[in-house]
Image (tube, rainbow, N blue to C red):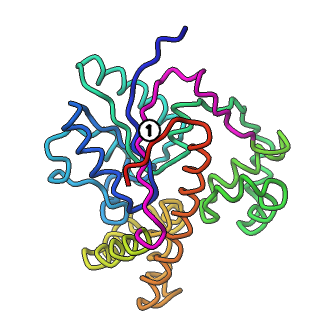
């Protein structure tokens, strides 16, 4: 019988209110928050990621925020390793670990583990000579399920996916064997209705633009360049297109709204899959 560690996981699509709920739970349960967000780990990505502010933290310790420079990479495996360490440290202090965020493959990596797939330097070298469009088309054709989970502008992840596809045939599904996990998870799912979420996304975007999103992206672009900027998420990619005069300022809000809603739908699909395999309860 596995003596599993008890954690609380707050999950939901973008703009659903996960951070606020995590702070509320931390106050109620005497907990600390671990961010499960693949972009809030980066310093300087504040407005575009709607990073939790010191005021919003309300004195609750938050972890895995601002731990990398935007030029550095950070993998799901690294997250799982860091989160495991932090969970043990938080429990040793007699506190409750509360994990909150929307990066579903980070949650999967921590709770269910990652498939061990070795890198193939020769295959990767061949792939790196391809254009973005060639890589996208091959991944789409050979593994549409995996392609649907990827950001088409993230060349680094597309290359890794195609490397695995060429060596393994397809990217293997991560097993969702809850009984084999070292964690006993209390799932708190925040999943607003479609119309409510669309309105929240639009409100958040309008506020981000008013708060200086364009200026933030310009600063990050100067630090990392356009290729890396595209890997930092759709807000940074779309605003980057504007900064390169590839789109108008008037198109920013509508384009970002459409793309963020598409991303939110993918998050909702993950939540539906999660609900079929884990004991979850909705808060909204």
Q: Residue 180 lies in what quarter of the image?
A: top right
Q: How many numbered markers are drawn? A: 1
Q: Name above or below for residue 218 compared with residue 161.
A: below
Question: In the displayed structure, does residue 212 sit left or right of residue 75?
Answer: left
Q: Position of residue 66 (x, y in %)?
A: 31, 47
Q: Position of residue 188 (x, y in %)?
A: 40, 42
Q: Position of residue 53 (x, y in %)?
A: 21, 54
Q: Few, some or many C-alpha atoms within 10 Å of disc 1 (few <14, some 14-19, many ≥20)?
A: many
| 164 or 50, nearer to the observer | 50
**Quadrant in the rendering for residue 129:** bottom right
* Image quarter of the C terminus: bottom left
Element at badge 1?
strand
| Residue positioned 42% across, 30% down in the render | 82
Residue 186 sits inside the magenta stretch:
yes
Q: Is residue 39 magenta?
A: no
Tell me if residue 35 comes above or below residue 31 in the rendering.
Answer: below
**What residue sits 24% from the left and 37% below the top?**
26
Instruction: Identify the residue position indicated by label 1 in the image.
Output: 187
Which quarter of the figure has residue 262? bottom right
Q: Is residue 173 left or right of residue 220?
A: right
Please state the extent of the stretch shown in magenta in the rendering: 172-196
Q: Nearer the viewer, residue 222 or 88?
A: 88
Task: Single out the residue that lies furthest toward the top.
Answer: 1
Q: Residue at x 63, y 59 (%)?
A: 155
Quarter of the image where the N terminus is located = top right
* 191 relative to 91, above or below: below
Q: Kindly identify the residue that appears in the image at 81 percent across and 60 percent down.
A: 138
């Amino acid at each position: 019988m596995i003596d599993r560690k008890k954690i609380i996981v707050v999950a939901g699509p973008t703009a659903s209110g996960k951070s606020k709920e995590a702070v509320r739970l931390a106050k109620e349960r005497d907990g600390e928050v671990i961010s499960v967000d693949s972009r809030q780990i980066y310093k300087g990505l504040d407005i575009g990621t709607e990073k939790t502010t010191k005021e919003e933290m309300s004195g609750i310790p938050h972890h895995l925020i601002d731990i990398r420079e935007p030029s550095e990479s950070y993998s799901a495996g690294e997250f799982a390793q860091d989160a495991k360490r932090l969970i043990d440290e938080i429990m040793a202090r007699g506190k409750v670990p509360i994990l909150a965020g929307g990066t579903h493959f980070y949650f999967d990596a921590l709770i269910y583990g990652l498939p061990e797939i070795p890198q193939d330097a020769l295959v990767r070298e061949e792939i790196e000579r391809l254009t973005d469009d060639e890589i996208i088309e091959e991944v789409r054709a050979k593994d549409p399920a995996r392609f649907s989970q990827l950001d088409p502008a993230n060349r680094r992840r597309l290359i890794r996916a195609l490397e695995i596809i060429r060596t393994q045939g397809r990217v293997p599904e991560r097993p969702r064997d809850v009984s084999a996990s070292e964690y006993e998870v209390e799932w708190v799912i925040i999943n607003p209705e479609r119309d409510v979420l669309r309105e929240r996304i639009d409100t958040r975007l309008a506020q981000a633009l008013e708060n200086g999103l364009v200026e933030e992206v310009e600063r990050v672009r100067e630090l990392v360049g356009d290729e890396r900027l595209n890997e930092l998420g759709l807000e940074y990619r779309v605003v980057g297109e504007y900064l390169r005069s590839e789109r108008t300022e008037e198109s920013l809000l509508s384009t970002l709204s459409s793309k963020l809603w598409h991303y939110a739908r993918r998050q909702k699909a993950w939540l539906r899959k999660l609900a079929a395999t884990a004991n979850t309860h909705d808060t909204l």
